[in-house]
């Protein structure tokens, strides 16, 4: 999984880069079909923005945008939102499969 971190009107220090890489690398534990993650850090309107684009193999892209006063706080909230979206996507995939299996076994039990 590739994680790219860039900044717009913000200097991305080594500390910020390591922090974001460490946090976003844990998302692979939740959802295994992540191809790459783009993290874009911005400084706009006196707020620090953290925009995250997660490219998945089968399900397209997930996009999260968070604005906070502090950069590390924006990264933390973005991580939480990404994990929530990935869990929801994983649940959609797995629950859909289980419902199909349950219908097949239920039809056989009635006969």
Image (tube, helix red, strand yellow):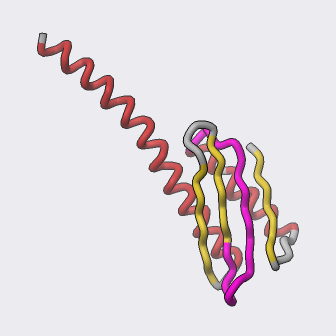
Q: Is residue 77 above or below residue 59?
A: below
Q: Which residues are magenta?
A: 31-49
Residue farthest bottom in this picture: 46
Closest to the observer, 32 or 63: 63
Indicate left or right for 104 with 28 as reference.
left
Magenta residue check for 47: yes
* Image location of residue 77, percent across then percent down: 58, 69
Indicate left or right for 12 with 88 as reference.
right
- Residue at the spot x=76%, y=57% of the render? 21
- Location of the N terminus (image quadrant): top right
* Image location of residue 4, percent across then percent down: 79, 56
Indicate left or right for 93 with 61 as reference.
left
Indicate left or right for 97 with 102 as reference.
right
- Residue at the spot x=48%, y=42% of the render? 90
- Location of the C terminus (image quadrant): top left
Magenta residue check for 38: yes
**Quarter where residue 67 is shown:** bottom right
* Image location of residue 12, percent across then percent down: 84, 71
- Residue at the spot x=60%, y=72% of the render? 66
- Residue at the spot x=54%, y=62% of the render? 81
Q: Main secondary structure of the magenta part?
A: strand
Residue farthest front in this picture: 60
Mark count: 0
* Image location of residue 107, percent across then percent down: 19, 17
**Quarter where residue 30 is shown:** top right
Residue farthest left in this picture: 110
Q: Is residue 85 above or below residue 43?
A: above
């Amino acid at each position: 999984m590739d994680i790219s971190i860039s900044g717009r009107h913000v200097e991305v220090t080594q500390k910020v880069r390591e922090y974001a890489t460490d946090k976003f690398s844990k998302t692979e534990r939740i959802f295994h079909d992540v191809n790459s993650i783009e993290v874009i850090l911005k400084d706009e309107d006196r707020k620090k923005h953290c925009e995250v684009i997660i490219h998945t193999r089968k399900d397209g892209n997930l996009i999260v945008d968070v604005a906070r006063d502090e950069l590390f706080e924006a990264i933390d909230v973005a991580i939480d939102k990404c994990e929530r979206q990935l869990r929801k996507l994983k649940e959609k995939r797995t629950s859909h499969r289980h419902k199909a299996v349950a219908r097949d076994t239920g039809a056989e039990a009635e006969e």
